[in-house]
Image (cartoon, rainbow, N blue to C red):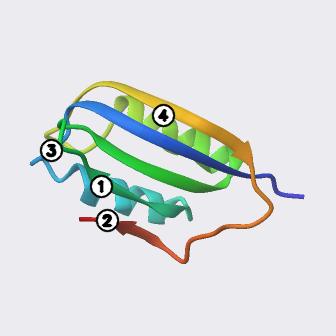
Amino acid sequence: MVQLIGVDFEVFGRVQGVFFRKYTQKHGNELGLKGWCMNTDKGTVIGRLEGEKNKIEEMKNWLRYTGSPQSAIDKAEFRNEKEISKISFNNFEIKK
């Protein structure tokens, strides 16, 4: 049986004005993940990921080391990771 995980994230560095959210949404969709991401007032990008554990791990690495082509990631933090019984989002959206 597939293990579903939910986790919150925050990415620090040059992640605003570099299409970071758009690329995050695209990569999340490619991995079949659901959730959301948005810019914060302090210059970070926060969001929520839900999906298969191995896909979440892949996305975490992407958020840590890859990001959008013009971004410069200092660090990515992950919080509240836990197993979930079902996905609570219909898609991966960018919140304003």
The amino acid on which the numbered mark 3 sits, given as a three-letter code, is Gln
**Distance of mark 3 from mark 4, alpha carbons?**
19 Å
Is tag 3's residue or tag 4's residue first in the polypeptide sequence?
A: 3
Identify the mark at residue 66; answer none if there is no mark.
none
Identify the mark at residue 94; answer none if there is no mark.
2
> Which residue position holds label 4?
61
> Which residue position holds label 1?
38
Is tag 3's residue or tag 2's residue first in the polypeptide sequence?
A: 3
Going 36% across and 62% down the picture, which residue do you hit?
26
Going 36% across and 45% down the picture, which residue do you hit?
46
Going 49% across and 62% down the picture, which residue do you hit?
35
Identify the residue at the far front of this view: 41
> Which residue position holds label 3?
16
To which quarter of the image does residue 36 belong?
Answer: bottom left
Q: Determine the secondary structure under disc 3.
A: loop
The amino acid on which the numbered mark 4 sits, given as a three-letter code, is Asn
> Is there CB contact under 8 Å for labels 1 and 2?
yes
Out of 22 and 66, give the one closest to the viewer.
22
Q: Determine the secondary structure under disc 4.
A: helix
In front: mark 1 or mark 4?
1
Is tag 2's residue or tag 4's residue first in the polypeptide sequence?
A: 4
**Distance of mark 3 from mark 2, alpha carbons?**
13 Å
